[in-house]
Image (cartoon, helix red, strand yellow):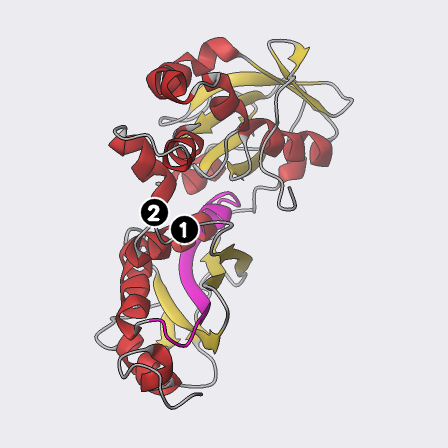
Amino acid sequence: MAGDEPAESMAGLGEFVVIDRLVAGRKQPDVVTVGPGDDAAVVTAPDGRTVVSTDMLVEGRHFRLDWSSPHDVGRKAIAQNAADIEAMGAVPTAFVVAFGAPGDTPAASSVELADGMWEEARLFGAAIVGGDLVSAPQWVISVTALGDLDGRAPVLRSGAHPGDTVAVTGVLGRSAAGFALCDNDIDGFAALRRAHLTPEPPYGQGQAAADNGARAMTDVSDGLIADLGHIAHASGVGVNVSTASLAVDREALSEAADAVGVDPWTWVLGGGEDHALVATFPGPPPTGWRSIGTVLDGPPRVLVDGEQWAGKPGWQSYD
């Protein structure tokens, strides 16, 4: 590295000094038998199976540092990965994080990022158990999440049956609304802006769904229509969503939608990154879930009030 880097930058301090700062004082949960400091961590899997998922956040694509603090970015990185574990009916237990950033990034920013990650992980008793640091032209955060099924069968996208109830837990459209407000530099609506910066998945509800017979499940990361489409195609079924059942979400967004000049249904049905969970059940959904539609005989498709949705179904990684 260049010798003129600021002393308290990541490059100025060097990789191992920064790592020491990131792990100092962190308490690992009981499932971690070997934490950071060796070539790899050791995490127990009481169930005998490990649920694994990975996701990446790229500065300018998934977050902006002029909108989000490093702490916000850390929370979001863990939340979106934990939601994938929840969507399998499992409990998130540990995370491995790789962080790329320019060498002149203040070391304090990396510590703030890690603080956010730890704060989010502690909400459900998990930990950051290892990772890597690398120089990069912009911030890039790659997270691998581990989870435990605790004796449950995994809930797949492919298990929906005609006649099932479609239900959701968590909020819909808030993150998309928050993004639009930030992108259009519209003041106010602090709760919606916060929903985009630090989404709040319904932790524990993935396990509750599995315990109550959920047949198929996914998290709403791309958009309700898009993610229900994954279930429909994996299960070979149709899905019909009722807007009447989503009126509470539309109402919560109507004022912000007027300010931005969009139809709030665009956010409710096509907005992603709330990381709500949507699942199908053979009967009524459990407490904390609300019915929003039904599963139909194939072909695979998602209908809204019995009709094709004309709007954008959700996020596309290469748009």
Q: Position of residue 238 (x, y in %)?
A: 70, 21
Quarter of the image for the C terminus: give it. top right
| 224 is higher (above) or lower (below) than 115 | above
Q: Amino acid at mark 1?
A: Arg
Q: Is residue 278 visible?
A: yes
> Between 241 and 256, which is closer to the camera in this rendering?
256
> Between 187 and 305, which is closer to the camera in this rendering?
187
Q: Is residue 203 visible?
A: no
In magenta stretch: residue 95: yes
On residue 64, the disc is 1
Q: Position of residue 92 (x, y in %)?
A: 42, 55
Residue under the point 48% across and 59% down = 145
- Secondary structure under tag 1 reads loop
Q: Position of residue 208 (x, y in %)?
A: 41, 37
Q: Which residue is mark 2?
A: 67
Place residue 3 in its image quadrant: bottom left
The residues tagged by marks 1 and 2 sit, at their Cα atoms, a distance apart of 5 Å
Q: Amino acid at mark 2?
A: Trp
On residue 315, the disc is none
The answer to whether the residues at label 1 and label 2 have Cβ atoms under 8 Å apart is: yes
- Region of the chain picked out in magenta, as a range: 82-105
| 44 is higher (above) or lower (below) than 285 | below
Residue occupying the far front of the picture? 4
